[in-house]
Amino acid sequence: MKRKIAVLGATGSIGKSTLDVIAANQDDFEIILLSAHQDTRGLLSLGTQLPSAKLVITDHQKWEGQTPETRSVITYWGQDGLVQAIKESGADIVVNGIAGAAGLLPSITALETGADLALANKETIVMAGPLVASIAKKNHCRILPVDSEHSAVFHLLEAHGADAVEEVILTASGGPFRQYSREQLEQVSLQDALNHPTWKMGGKITIDSASLANKGLEVIEAVRLFSLKVDQVSVLVHPQSYVHSLIRLKDGSLYAQISKPDMRVPIHNALFWPEVRYCQFGRLDLVGQSLHFEQPKTDLFPLLPLAYEAARLGEGYPTAYNAANEEAVAAFMKGHISFVDIGRIVAQVLEKEWSCDELDLQSILDVDQRSRAAAQECIKELHH
Ligand code: MG
């Protein structure tokens, strides 16, 4: 029987890659729900090809502005509409490709319905790792990482057993500013930051890759997703983006997952898990290739060491790190602050108190709100 798939963030880069994987495996999967935030036209065009799928626009105002005809096709709207559509969909697997903290509630809803969660939204784990793990356990469903590094680690841990592992090494492309000096970093424009050398992704994550905040979020994600100690997770810059991550076993051996940088590989692996099936995407011929590795420059890219600090402090700190960074990146994209201000703002927000005894949803959302407000204060001071 075909497995029923819901694709959240269907018009974004994860969504498009997911639709490619499903198009290549039509005997195995069927799409029953598609959501987008604002791209009504893109969603409608996908809906024409899949007339039985439920369609959701999560931006309430965007939906309000549509013609009655469009609204009769896109029958769910807003965050509440997405939650309701997931509950009614009967999905076996929910692919969450939503960008940012907005992905948390849909992840929780998916797990509560008993669906497996193919997760590209790292904020879900950064903000609420222990909470979503317990919801998944209670409902007997799996969290299948789609982030390329975590997909690699997930499959490596599965192959070798978590007990044998000493260290997890996440690779980073290093982004477009890998070889920049401090002076050059102070001058970078939005256009420079949006120009990623190896991956084609949305704006926010591309800027996070340039600042290494994306790798910072991934360190926290790895700690919380795989129940690792912070010191067990390290980062290695690897500009080719062929090695997606490595594990070092207690005997000293390194094992890596290697393929071209193509998100369809981790998506394929998540959708077919636990089976290993033929995949036409991302195949790499190693002949003539050279693989380079170097240390990340933590003095020039403070968002990486700040993420380690947030991971060590735990509790509400990872949520505050993420929220402050989201606000700062949005301000950078509007031209209100400079690229290097992003790190300054996150550092200032993390100096405040973000302990919380219980990591339930309400406390997490409360930290999220308060840390965004704190970030806005810093942005106001920097934006003249
Ligand atoms: Mg990644």
Image (cartoon, helix red, strand yellow):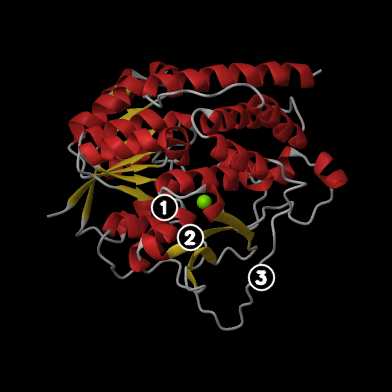
Amino acid type at image mark 1: Ser
Label 3 vs 2, first from the N-terminus:
2
Distance from disc 3 to disc 2, alpha carbons, whole Å, reads: 19 Å
Of circles 3 and 2, the one toward us is 3
Q: Nearer the viewer, residue 143 or 230?
A: 230
**Above or below, 156 relative to 369:** below
Gap between marks 1 and 3 measured at Cα: 27 Å
Q: Amino acid at mark 3?
A: His
Q: Residue 8 in the image: state x and y as whole percent.
A: 36, 38
Task: Indicate the position of residue 260 as horizontal and vertical percent values.
Answer: 51, 67
Instruction: Residue under label 2, please give it.
Output: 262
Mark 3 or mark 1, which is nearer the start of the sequence?
1
- Quick check: can you spot residue 318? yes
Estimate the spatial distance between the alpha carbons at disc 1 and disc 2, rounded to whole Å: 9 Å
Q: What type is the residue that disc 2 sits on?
A: Asp
Contact (Cβ within 8 Å) of mark 1 with mark 2: yes
Residue indicated by mark 1: 17
Which residue lies under the disc numbered 3? 292
Q: Badge 1: how crowded within 10 Å, few (<14), some, or many (20+)?
A: many
Q: Residue at x 65, y 45 (%)?
A: 304
For marks 1 and 2, the one nearer the N-term is 1
Residue 54 appears in the rendering:
no
Question: How many other residues sit within 10 Å of disc 3, few (<14), some (14-19) or many (≥20)?
Answer: few
